Amino acid sequence: MGFLSILSFAHAIVGERVRSGDVVVDATMGNGHDTLFLAGLVGDGGHVYAFDVQPAALAATQARLAAAGVPAARYTLLLRDHAELADALPTDARGAVAAAMFNLGYLPGADHAVTTQPATTLRALDAALATLRVGGALCAVVYPGHPGGAEEAAAVEAWAAALEPERWQAVTYRFLNPRNPPPYVVAVEKRK
Ligand code: SAH
């Protein structure tokens, strides 16, 4: 088997953990690719809570979901900082979330100054972990090649590396010899 691309790896680890009827989180909606992927996994009985701070991201995501025919009852698009994730989710989602996806950096095609920031990203990652069920996973794609992205990627990696090993299993998936610093995956599974 050839090595999976970064995005294929992210989708594989999320896809194998999410079942029809599950509740999941897209912490960085962007243009809605992951929101659509997640909405397909959870089916009509499930729900996707998706976050972004830019109205353009919500508009792009809404358009993508509608064009794909995803019923509106399957998702909630929140114009909200993902650092507020714990407050934004219904209380019954706590400890029940099957997967949380992060795709850091800036919205392609929009203002590159609006980018995820290490401080709020780390708060959001902590909040997302607290919502996971046992066997659930958090998957972050980090972008060390973006301005400010190397610091953020290092912060996310250090955050994951410091998690208590009895409760969490943390991995990275990255290509070691590309010409430019490539995006890579930092993923965490809740063990107990
Ligand atoms: N770098 C990826 C796309 C990332 S999109 C690529 O190149 O494909 C990241 C999204 O996160 C953007 O739409 C941005 O608006 C959003 N974002 C930035 N800060 C945020 C925050 N605090 N809470 C939620 N979303 C945020």
Image (spheres, rainbow, N blue to C red):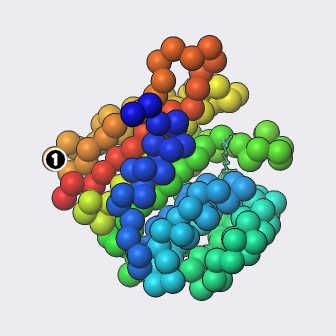
The quadrant holding residue 33 is: bottom right
- Camera-side residue of 41 and 131: 41
As displayed, is residue 52 above or below residue 96? above
Q: Amino acid at mark 1?
A: Glu
At x 30% / y 51%, what residue is drawn? 189
Q: Position of residue 123 (x, y in %)?
A: 48, 51
**Mark 1 burial class by Cα count in 10 Å: few <14, some 14-19, many 20+:** few
Q: Which residue is mark 1?
A: 166
Q: Position of residue 159 (x, y in %)?
A: 39, 38
Quarter of the image with the C terminus in it: bottom left
Q: Is residue 4 left or right of residue 131?
A: right
Q: Where is residue 113? Give x, y as percent.
A: 79, 39
Q: Quadrant of residue 39?
A: bottom right
Residue 31 against residue 46 in the figure, above or below: above
In the current view of this chain or complex, which residue is farthest to the front? 1
Residue at disc 1, CB closer than 8 Å to ligand 1: no
Above or below, 93 relative to 189: below
User: Closest to the observer: 63 or 113?
Assistant: 63
Count of numbered labels shown in the rendering = 1
- Residue 159 visible in the shown view: no
Relative to 179, residue 127 above or below: below
What residue is shown at x 21% (from left), y 54% (from top)?
191
The residue sitting at 57% across, 32% down in the picture is 183
Residue furthest to the left in view is 166
Q: Is residue 19 left or right of residue 115?
A: left
Q: In this view of the protein, can residue 146 be seen by the observer?
A: yes
Query: Disc 1 on helix, strand or loop?
Result: loop
Q: Which of the two residues, 86 or 112, is positioned nearer the viewer here?
A: 112
The x and y percentages for residue 2 are 44, 31
Q: Quadrant of the N terminus?
A: top left
Tell me the residue at 65%/72% (across/down). Answer: 77
